Image (cartoon, rainbow, N blue to C red):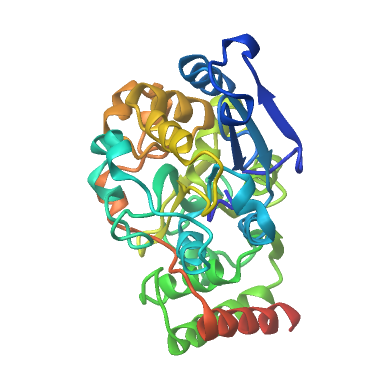
Amino acid sequence: MTRPMIAAMFGMAVMGSALGSMSVAAADESTLTIFNWADYLPQDVVDEFEAKHHVRVVQNYYNSNAEMLAKLQSGGDHQYDLAFPSDYFVPRLIKAGLVQPLDGARLTNRSHLLADFRNPSYDPDESYSVPYQWGATGIAYNADALPDLPPDWHALFDPKANPTHPFALLKGDGQFTLSTACAYLDKGYDCIGREDWLAAAKVVGPTLKRANYVGFVGATAALDQLARGVIDVGVVYNGDFARKQVEDPESFRNIRFFIPREGSQRWVDAMVIPAHAPHPELAAAFMNYLLTPEVAARVSNANFYSTPVADAVPLLKPALRDSVATPDEQQRKRLAYTPSLDGQQLQFVQQLWTELRSR
């Protein structure tokens, strides 16, 4: 995610739950060590796996994909058994030799996946990753303040669509912002190439200078600001919006969400096994366990993000079966993965973004 999607509240804190005497293996063989976003694995799901497999699960947390990558590069690929990178980071990990091929025979529950999540562009042969949770990035807005806001990227980039009401862009990721401007220009969210990125920059640059632009705001913070009336338009993740609707319906009764009709981001947080994981077989067992429909539904019911497991969808809470929380087939057709960049492409986008931010 790009999940950029869950805030890590506990830094590098360690959480573990153990069953002590229930372990039937040697101590160093009975611990599954996970590197993950905070608050992303429901504790009851972890507890059940520990009981079934007579093991202990320990989690370390990271705040960003970049932090995860740096840790794996500095020896974490020997320390952790399982990590949860966002989709566009999977090819970077593969190219860097930081993840190992999966044993497909141990992942029998892949058969439960929606067709959309088989052979994804970021891992076309399904050799290195398994999807865990997914979602869509869209626009939330105050329907009282902007009842006629167009359901597309014009809501952000066209001054005529919103000449005066305060709005924010999503914090942090230059490629994401340029990609949304590409979509606005009908070049597709998954645009690639200097010509398209330069055209997108010509849209983003003036947007950053508009009087009603308030700055870059994180997705969860944008929802809080919408509820308080600080902004009237912001970029958010569908799962976060669905959660807020359930938890605080009064504050969000006039807040609406849409996936822009020109297309937007489909993000996936995947599961991978580091190259020198101490317990790869146990990690594969945990992957397969999380793909069990009943378990996958419990994960989504706790996180409010979508499950890629088709047979889990009927088991979701009613609020999560809504098309906001779980986009329907037509909505999914408008979504694209963020292309994974490296080398000169990545350097060009980073330099372009730095120039836009400094003007």
Q: Residue furthest front?
A: 26
Q: Residue furthest bottom?
A: 195
Which picture quadrant has residue 152? Answer: bottom left
Work out whether 49 lies above or below 346.
Answer: above
Which picture quadrant has residue 292? Answer: top left
Is 207 on the left-hand or right-hand side of 24? right
Total labels drawn: 0
The picture places residue 316, in percent across and down from the top left corner, at 38, 24
Q: Nearer the viewer, residue 357 or 309?
A: 309
Residue that appears at 52% across and 17% down: 54
The picture places residue 197, in percent across and down from the top left corner, at 49, 83
Is 190 on the left-hand or right-hand side of 346? left
Residue that appears at 45% across and 56% down: 87
Is 108 on the left-hand or right-hand side of 21? left
Q: Nearer the viewer, residue 286 or 136?
A: 286
Work out whether 172 lies above or below 10.
Answer: below
Q: Nearer the viewer, residue 207 or 353?
A: 353
Q: Residue furthest top?
A: 21
Residue that appears at 56% across and 25% down: 42
The picture places residue 272, in percent across and down from the top left corner, at 47, 48
Work out whether 252 lies above or below 221.
Answer: above
Q: Nearer the viewer, residue 353 or 159?
A: 353
Quadrant where the C terminus is found in the figure = bottom right
Is 262 on the left-hand or right-hand side of 351? left
| Residue 71 visible in the displayed image | no
| Residue 214 visible in the displayed image | yes
The picture places residue 351, in percent across and down from the top left corner, at 64, 84
